[in-house]
Amino acid sequence: MNPKFSIAFATALVALTAAGSVQAYDPDWKRGRVYYRMVCTECHEAKAGGAINPATKTKAEWAAYIQADKHAKGKESLKHYVSKKYRDSIKATNKAAAKFADVPEQELLEDLKAFLNKGAKDGDAPAKCS
């Protein structure tokens, strides 16, 4: 066997094996729902004058909102509210923040996205804050 071909074949085999072992995160909309209802809704009811029903926006509107990463009328980053730092700051009084304290931030954000997509106006199961 040609040595150059052997090296190329071995390199391709390693690349395919590595690519196959990397798995994308499968968002958990149920965890997103728990976090949304226990953290987001609780905060909105206490500080913003009322909960925000996921069905008030379409999937596209939620995607644009999350992509913009603006919260509190653009004053804050939305990602701050899924950060470990934020969860740490409220975990003494919020069971969901305590329960999900060690969840990676990106996973929790993906979980929230999955819930908002499911509960959006045009989602599979338009949601209510209850």
Image: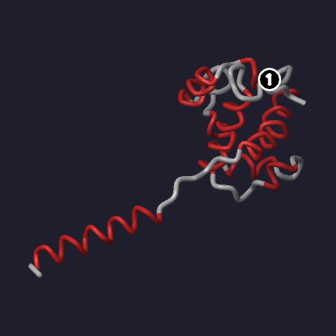
Query: How many marks on residues?
Result: 1
Q: Is residue 125 above or below residue 103?
A: above
Residue for badge 1: 53
Q: Residues within 10 Å of mark 1 (few under 14, many from 20)?
A: some
Query: SS of the residue at dot 1?
Result: loop
Choose top left, top right, bottom left or bottom right for residue 100.
bottom right
Q: Of residues 28 and 45, which is closer to you in this image?
A: 28
Residue 76: horizontal and vertical position, in percent?
Answer: 63, 30
At 54% from the left and 30% from the top, the residue drawn is 67
Q: Of residues 112 and 84, which is closer to you in this image?
A: 112
At 80% from the left and 27% from the top, the residue drawn is 127
Q: Of residues 95 and 6, which is closer to you in this image?
A: 6
Quarter that holds the C terminus: top right
At 87% from the left and 47% from the top, the residue drawn is 94
At 51% from the left and 58% from the top, the residue drawn is 23
Residue 120: horizontal and vertical position, in percent?
Answer: 71, 25
Quarter that holds the N terminus: bottom left
Q: Would you say 50 lies left or right of 110 here?
A: right
Q: Would you say 94 lies left or right of 54 here?
A: right
Residue 69: horizontal and vertical position, in percent?
Answer: 57, 31
Q: How is the image coloured?
A: secondary structure
Choose top left, top right, bottom left or bottom right for residue 128.
top right
Instruction: Report the amino acid beneath label 1.
Output: Asn
Q: Is residue 113 above or below residue 106?
A: above
Residue 99: horizontal and vertical position, in percent?
Answer: 81, 55
Choose top left, top right, bottom left or bottom right for residue 2.
bottom left
